[in-house]
Image (cartoon, grey):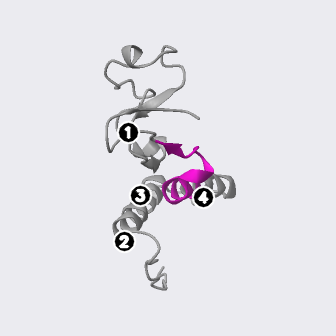
Amino acid sequence: MTHETKMLAYSDKLGADEQVSMEEMISSRIFDEVHGLTDPMGEEDCNALGREILYNVLRKFRPDLFEQELTCYNCKWKGYESDMEKTVAKGNVPDLYERTDDGADSAVGECPECGALIEEA
């Protein structure tokens, strides 16, 4: 069976590397799901795979739909928790409890630009 595909251009509004990375993730996920299947995927499985892929694409290119935008009050960096390497959720913020007044209840992570602790608004 041959599939004719229309080549789409990459969006100028998004980074080409990010688009290629997401394209590879989608291709890999589809390949992993259908590789070695003897029966075609059912409608329910296709729908679930489609939802998973859409979720990953939106999460990558529109994090504002899933996360609150954060601001570093020290250097004015703006971004999302997913942009930060050191986060409370990952458990890799050094001296977390010594750096907060409330025992880290409102801390999210370290600013990737200046290293200051960023707290939820």
Nearest the viewer among 47 and 119 is 119
- Estimate how packed mark 3 is, as few (under 14), some (14 to 19) or many (20 or more) residues with alpha carbons within 10 Å: some
Which callout, 4 or 2, points at the residue further toward the start of the chain? Answer: 2
Which residue sits at x=39%, y=69%? 15
- Quarter of the view holding residue 49: bottom right
Q: Which mark is residue 25?
A: 3
| 95 to 6, vertically: above or below | above
| Quadrant of the rendering where the C terminus is positioned | top right
Q: What range is drawn magenta here? A: 54-71
Which callout, 3 or 1, points at the residue further toward the start of the chain? Answer: 3
What separation in Å lies between label 2 and label 1 (alpha carbons)?
25 Å
Q: Which mark is residue 50?
A: 4
Which residue sits at x=41%, y=58%? 25
Q: Which mark is residue 6?
A: none
Kindly identify the amino acid type of the residue bearing the numbered disc 3: Met
Residue with the most extreme right position: 44
Q: Which residue is mark 1?
A: 111
Which residue sits at x=50%, y=56%? 38
Quick check: marks 2 and 1 in contact, CB under 8 Å?
no
Element type at marker 4?
helix
Q: Position of residue 87 (x, y in %)?
A: 41, 31
Q: Position of residue 44 (x, y in %)?
A: 68, 53
Q: Position of residue 69 (x, y in %)?
A: 55, 46
- Estimate how packed mark 4 is, as few (under 14), some (14 to 19) or many (20 or more) residues with alpha carbons within 10 Å: some
Query: Which mark is nearer the camera, 4 or 2?
Result: 2
Q: Which mark is residue 16?
A: 2
